[in-house]
Amino acid sequence: MQKIAVLTSGGDAPGMNAAIRAIVRAGLAAGWQVFGVQNGFAGLVGGDMRRLSSRDVGGVMRQGGTFLGSARSEEFRQRWGREQSLDHLRSQEIDALIVIGGNGSQTGGHALLEMDFPVVGVSSTIDNDLEGTDITIGADTAINVALEAIDRLKVTAASHRRAFLVETMGRDCGYLALMAGLAGGAEVVSIPERDLSPQEIAAGLHDAYARGKSHALAVVAEGAQHTAEELVRYFNEHRHETGFNLRVTVLGHVQRGATPTASDRVLASRLGSGAVTALQEGRIGVLVGLHGDHVGFTPLDRVAGRTKLVDLDALPFARVMAR
Ligand code: F6P
């Protein structure tokens, strides 16, 4: 092994920069050259890569986003795009590629692996929906952003005795909504793995007032069957029956761009250098993730195309905690 390349792909996640930094510095310490690919798989198709030095990654750890850029590439989904990517990697004499990203990105890496190119993945997405890791880089920061919004909305909710609804990101996984709801003491949590009907959400909010609370707040994951938009419509149409107004905040991309928490920086440093260790040990075609307290490795074919769902036991627990 002499030359490796790294790219970030899919939605940016806070801590991606710390992971690139770790790969560059651990790779250089192993005596290798490290190349950064611009704009994810789109840059790979176009052969857009440059050599990175230790100084190139100085100061990036405290920045959200990814200084290499990211993209969702249509060309790479085509066979010709993947073949062109391999041509570029081989013409630069790159021995292995490290892919930092979530579900779609690891599926992309797996496709190159199936074309006999050595690939290692690093778990990174705010959604924490990847098989093969307990937690992904970026999830902790995104939860904290959602939590700050919930804390602030509760102040206003209590001042006005109003009900609030917060929609989080998370694609088809309820982890972000559930953890932010648990940490923020939300009265109601609706996630794709356990959807609540508009009537159930109304009953949950109503019950909070009945228990003497001065506020009532629901967290709804974007992947839940009844989205914020639909719920607002329902609450407007049934204002007389529910007995209260509902104000809605859709957090959207605000959850992606924050300064990474200490936890995400440490995780990213461990998983990034874990990817270099994997290559040193000849572990090709694995996802580097956190297994309990340890950095662990899972074959990419057990990760690609799958969605990790949340632990549903946390739902009744969150309900009891918000009594
Ligand atoms: O996967 C990260 C994520 O932010 C999801 O939570 C969300 O559904 C999606 O990306 C949004 O994608 P885009 O930035 O392409 O709109």
Image (spheres, grey):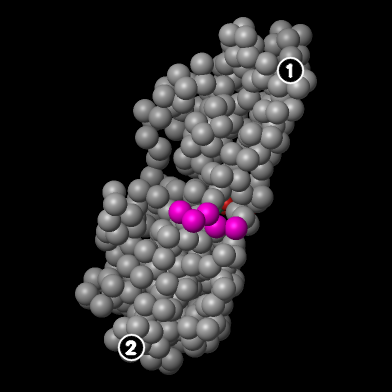
Q: Which residue is mark 2?
A: 31
- Give the side of residue 217 with respect to residue 269, left or right: right
Q: Is residue 103 visible?
A: no
In depth, the one of 67 and 108 nearer the eye is 67
Residue 268 x %, y %: 43, 62
Would you identify the image quadrant in which residue 100 lies? bottom left
Is 216 placed left or right of 143 in the picture? right
Question: Taken as a whole, is the magenta stretch helix, strand or loop?
Answer: loop
- What amino acid is labelled 2 in the image? Gly
Magenta region: 259-263
Q: Which mark is residue 100?
A: none
Viewer-side residue, 130 vs 64: 64
Among numbered discs 2 and 1, the one appearing first in the sequence: 2
Amino acid tagged 1: Arg
Q: Is 126 covered by the magenta stretch?
A: no
The structure residue drawn at horizontal position 40% and vertical position 29%, both measured from the top left corner, is 314
Residue pictured at 51% horizontal, 34% vertical: 183
Front-most of residues 58 and 70: 58
Question: How far separated are the C-alphas under marks 2 and 1?
Answer: 62 Å
Residue carrying label 1:
161
